[in-house]
Structures are given as C-alpha cells and as structure tokens.
Amino acid sequence: VESDYSVPVPDPSLPTPTAVKIREITAEDDGKRVEVNGWAHRIRNNGGLIFVTLRDGSGYLQCVLTKKLIKCLKAKQLLAECSLKIMGTIKIDERAPGGRELKADYWQLLGGSDGEVKAKVTFESNPDVLLTNRHLVHRGTNASNILRIRSHTMKAFRDHFDSRNVFEITPPTLVQTMVEGGSTLFALDYFGQPAYLTQSSQLYLETICPSLGDVYCIMPSYRAERSHTRRHLAEFTHVEVEYSFISFDDLLNRIEDMVCSVYDGLWERHGDIIAELRGKGETEAPKLERPFMRLEYMDAIKMCNEGPNPILKKVTRTNEDGSVETEFVPFEVGDDIPEAAERELVERIGRPVFMTKFLAKMKAFYMERDAQDASLPEPDQRTLSADLLLPGVGEVVGGSMRIPDLETITRKFKEEGLSLDDYYWYIDLRKYGGFPHGGFGLGLGRFICWLCGIDHIRDVTLYPRIEGRCKP
Ligand code: 4AD
C-alpha cells in the first residue's frame, strides 16, 4: 500500500536465512538464503528496481530490491549511508560486480541517513575539509583499503618479530625523560610534576634487553613538530626494536631482513589491495633489490655535490631591509641533508639505501662512536648510526648502536645537561652488565606511504595530529 510506512514483512514460508559477512559468500552459496547487515555504499534506482551496494567492512555486495519491496513510503528513506538489514537469495552472476548479487526478499532500515553525506567529502574537497570530515572519509573505498593495509602491516611486523624470537613489550608513553632532543617535547602536568609524552620508547626497550634479550614495541611516539611536511606528524606509530650483543653490521642486516620479509609477506597475502592503492596496474611486487645500498654520510655529501647536476642546499637569508634572499649552495660536512634533498638523492640512487655513520655532533647523545675515529675531536667522530632511505619517501628508519659503557654514557649525560638522577634506571643498565646493543625505530606511516605509493602521511593515518588540529 503506497501510504504504508512499515517495512515489508519477512515471508515465513522461506527458509531461515544464515547471517553472513559479505566476504564469506562463495560460489557454493548460489541459491542460499542469507541475511546481510551493512551500510548503503551506493544506491541506484533503475526502472523501478533499486540496486543497493551494501558495505559491511568485509566487502561490497550488490542487492536488488524489486518493485514489490519498495512500494512502501519507507523506501524513500533508502539513501546513501543508511544502515540496513537485507535478507534474500544469493545469485552467482558474472555480470554482477564481484560475480554475485543478492535478490532481496526482505529489508529493514536500521539507521537512517540524509543522503547528503556523500557530498560532504568528494575528490574536489580541500584538504582541511577532508581532515575535518575524516570520520566520513574512512567510509570510502580507498581510505578503508588503507586502513586494511595498516592493520595487515602491523600484523606483518608482529609476525616477523615473532618468527625471529623478539618479544613485544608495551612501555609507558607518559615519561619524565627525553630521547631525541628537548625542542620537540610535549610537556604536561603529571599530578603536579612535570612530565612529557614520549618521543621514543628506545630507552625503555634498552632496559628490558637484560630481561628478554631482544625486544620490540609498536607504540605511539610524540613530537611537537612545527614543520609541515608530508612525512611529519605530532603523533605517529613507532615500530621500535632493540637487539642485544649485535654488531653494527648485524643491525643493518636485521633492518634489511625486516623490511624485506614484511614487504614480501604483505605482497604475497594482500598484493591485490596494495596494487589497487598504488594504481599502476602492477600484478606483482616491484622488485626490491638486495642487499640495500650502504652509503656513508660523508660520501652522501660528496655525491650531492658532484656531477653536472648537483643536489644543492637551500639557504634563506633575511637582509637588513627585511627582504628575503634564497641561495642554493653545496652541502658541507656536518650539514643535515633536509627532506627534499634526501628524497632527491634516494630517487637518483633508485633503490633503498642505508645512509650510515652520521657525525656525533649531528645526532643524539646515546649513539656509539666509531672506534676508528677515536683520535678526532668528539663532535667530528662518526657514529655507528644509520637511516634507511626508501624511494619516494626518504627516511623511514633511524637506528644506531648505543654507548655501552658507564663512564662514557655518564659523561654524555652531563654534557647534555641531563640529570643523572632522572635517568638512574638507564645508567644502571651500564652499571650492571653493560653490553653491546643497538636498535632502531621505523615510522609505520612512512613505511605504508612507501609500500602503497602514497604521497602524504596524513592519508595513511587514522586521525592525523598536526599543528593546529586535534580532532576528530
Ligand atoms: O630517527 P628517529 O627520531 O629515531 C628515534 O626516535 C630513535 N630513538 C629510534 C630508536 O632507535 N629506537 O625516528 C625514527 C623513525 C624515523 O625514521 C621516522 O620514520 C619516524 O620514526 N618518525 C616520524 N614519523 C612521523 N612523524 C614524525 N614526526 C616522526 N619522527 C620520526
């Protein structure tokens, strides 16, 4: 009856349906009566039939609602993003998207929608609108595929460490110490005491080596980063590892082993989603050339400066009259290679490269020095450190060997102006059985950008935290 708002009534003579998730439906279900629950991803009215593409997170299913089912006024509420329960018979049909469809015999509106929601976020929306409506963006095919890959990637890292007998721990993120320099600390009031959001779980990982040997964690790290780049966030997911009794060479080999095994495993199990996100029509994983190139920092500086088309350093100067001048000059030893130059360098090399042995003055206080440089002034000594640069992104991993002995680490703390009392537990690690060890941190978002060919770390982050935005 046209005026009736009530939904169709299920036909009691039909077989009882089995509630299924869309991805569970196979060719064997042809002719079976099922119940699916989900959201109307797309709705198309076609000559009196309504085609609903139902999305339940596990997949998409075309459901066909015949005239008889949509003759009620309630059918006017079938709008994009409403939630529905639909019962019907599975029909395997090559012409349908995904090779099957549901011929509905009953539907029920679970939660209405205004149908306008799709217009809130479109391909043309500006980045700020997209960030404000990120909770809606996640309903889209591309964004949900990124979330899927993110979940699979975290599992792949866990599987990798598990297979190498590395234990997972969960260090606290509320801390009273700094690891990567004071300038990017988020300070907070901890029951009347000063505290910070952690920049890295490294120091805590180190303390657990004498307990578990090799340990890792996947935890958030925080940096009060003012730089608005496509690879920096104020909060990021940090995969960090610490290995006992290894050499610097072992450290590089383990990073390489991890990147390759996670990469291979993800392509093997989820290559279809990765290829779709990359959008290059690849049918298999692009070859990852091994071993990764190893390039000392000093040689990288030379490489930037040499040849007919050098990679130059951008220097901006403000003159007395307030005018700003920009100049491009060669890099000097001791310069940090900034993001754009670093990306250009790895682009030219064309494959993953470890940039190694940064000078002590450029890096964190805890890094072990290269014994070969013992006769040089300390700031000019090379450290046993490495960044892994990946094409398209640049630095994805940063790691080093740690100063193992009590005397040196105590001196470094004093030079940094850090209180030995605050770090007594870290110092104790050297007091009671100091040992050669090293580890690294990998930015999960940057890794996924590289894997899936995505430019911006925001696009692979659930709810990105950047300066000026803390919601949703
Ligand atoms: O090089 P970083 O600062 O090293 C550390 O924090 C060490 N304590 C890690 C360790 O040895 N356990 O950071 C490591 C990686 C970087 O290579 C980058 O991928 C990521 O963490 N990262 C960030 N990702 C997103 N936004 C930021 N602001 C990031 N800062 C670092």
Image: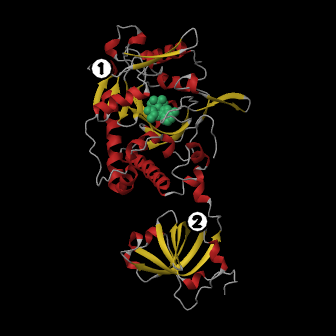
The residue drawn where x is 32% and y is 40% is 257
- Can you see residue 234? yes
Measured as percent of width and height from the top left, residue 54 is found at 52, 69
Q: In this figure, what is the number of numbered marks?
A: 2
Label whose residue precedes the other's in the sequence (1 or 2): 2
Measured as percent of width and height from the top left, residue 221 is found at 54, 36
Q: Residues within 10 Å of mark 2 (few under 14, many from 20)?
A: many
Q: Which of the 4 quarters of the picture holds residue 109? A: bottom right
Question: In the image shown, does 246 or 415 lie closer to the viewer?
Answer: 415
Q: Residue furthest bottom?
A: 13
Question: Is residue 461 placed above or below 361 in the rendered structure?
Answer: below
- Can you see residue 245? no
- In this figure, which residue is indicated by the disc labeled 1? 299
- Does 135 sit left or right of 98 as displayed? right
- Does 285 sit left or right of 181 as displayed? left
In the picture, the disc for residue 397 is none
Asked if ligand 1 lies within 8 A of label 1, the reply is no
Measured as percent of width and height from the top left, residue 181 is found at 54, 23
**What's under tag 1, amino acid-wise?**
Asp
- In this figure, which residue is indicated by the disc labeled 2? 80
Q: CA distance from mark 1 to mark 2?
A: 57 Å
- Give the SS element for disc 2: loop
Asked if ligand 1 lies within 8 A of label 2, the reply is no
**What's under tag 2, amino acid-wise?**
Ala
The residue drawn where x is 39% and y is 55% is 273
Question: Is residue 369 placed above or below 353 in the rendered structure?
Answer: above
